[in-house]
Amino acid sequence: MKDLTEFLELFMEKTGFPEDSRDTFRAYNRALLAGEASRAAFDSVVELYESDDPTPFFPPLDELSESLGFHKYTGDLFIFMYQAWFLREAYKEKGLPEQIYWDSMTDLRAKLIECRDVYGVNGSFVASWFHGFFELTRFALGRLQFEWTEYSREEPYTCCGHSVSKGDTLINMHIPSLGPLTVDLMMDAFKRAYNFPLFADVRVPGTDWMPFCCGSWLLYPPHYDFLPAKSNILKFMDCFDIVEWSDSEEFSDKWRVFGKYKDAEPADLPRDTSLRRAFAERLESGQKTGHGWGIFFFDGEKIIRPDDAGASV
């Protein structure tokens, strides 16, 4: 195990970890470095992490964390903080901008805040999500995160005479919980992705249009019926042609809206924001939530959708 104490301090500072959480990870790092047995155990976990199938490293890591007196979620986040040193070197080797590295690593802070809010623990309960960043397949470009994906629907998608078909590459996006998502921030992120060198060959065949897609609880068409008209979620939805959507029996993303109140009965849910109030009232009335999948084409300046020939959002 490398002693990355100095780097970990830099990492927590650059990504904006809350000060009290830093004390937790400092203590975890000290506990690992304190003895040969803990160092060796962590090295074994890292070997599993670096294997072809990194998933099995979580059980022994969780066991190690608990043996050191820490919550498993703390260790689950720490190993990615540790691996971030090696990822930084990979960015340098590939000539990728350091700012994109730090922006991408800020996702660890987003997941830390979620874990604190939902469980009161400094760590992450969704640490398996981080792999895309560390495999250099997912990048934060401005307010959003982007990665390659494949168009998998049997029928082609056509918009204004341009099409993508099964097997074509699209740019998928994710929305980290890092503050408001305004139209200006959305468009800035789309432009950054369009101009990102690693995505340069992702275009609708025969055109300069970049195909973007997203699958999310945010892209649920009935939101137009119950969310406030000025909601940034609706503005995000406006970018897409939502071609698939479905109701859900359970609101599995309830924690994203209500945090530690995710298990509360609808009547007891907090209504301290317009978003929470809208969802609490919908759930209390017995109505469903859901998910959707949407797509749009972008030429670096404007979005093209079926109902127009290319309009800026």
Image (cartoon, rainbow, N blue to C red):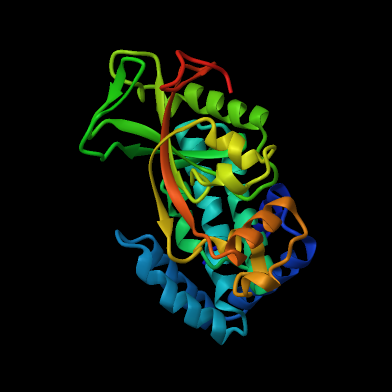
Q: Position of residue 247 (x, y in %)?
A: 42, 55
Instruction: State the residue in front, 128 or 253.
Output: 253
**Would residue 4 be seen by someone viewing this image from the given angle?**
no
Q: Is residue 155 visible?
A: yes
Horizontally, residue 185 falls left or right of residue 147, namely right
Residue 289 as seen in the image, left or right of residue 57: right
In the orientation shown, which residue stands out farthest toward the front? 285
Apparent side of residue 192 relative to residue 271 in the rendered image (left or right): left
Q: Is residue 51 above or below residue 147?
A: below
Position of the C terminus by quadrant: top right
Q: Quadrant of residue 201?
A: top left
**Relative image position of residue 203 (x, y in whole percent):** 35, 21
Q: How many marks?
A: 0
- On the image, the x and y values in percent for residue 78 come to 58, 65
Image coordinates of residue 72 in percent, x first then y, are 55, 77
Residue in the picture at 29% in, 59% down: 52
Comparing 302 with 220, the one in front is 220
For residue 129, above or below residue 120: above
Can you tell which quarter of the image residue 284 is in?
A: bottom right
Q: Residue drawn at (31%, 62%), measured in percent from left and top?
A: 53
Q: As drawn, is 305 to the left or to the right of 168?
A: right
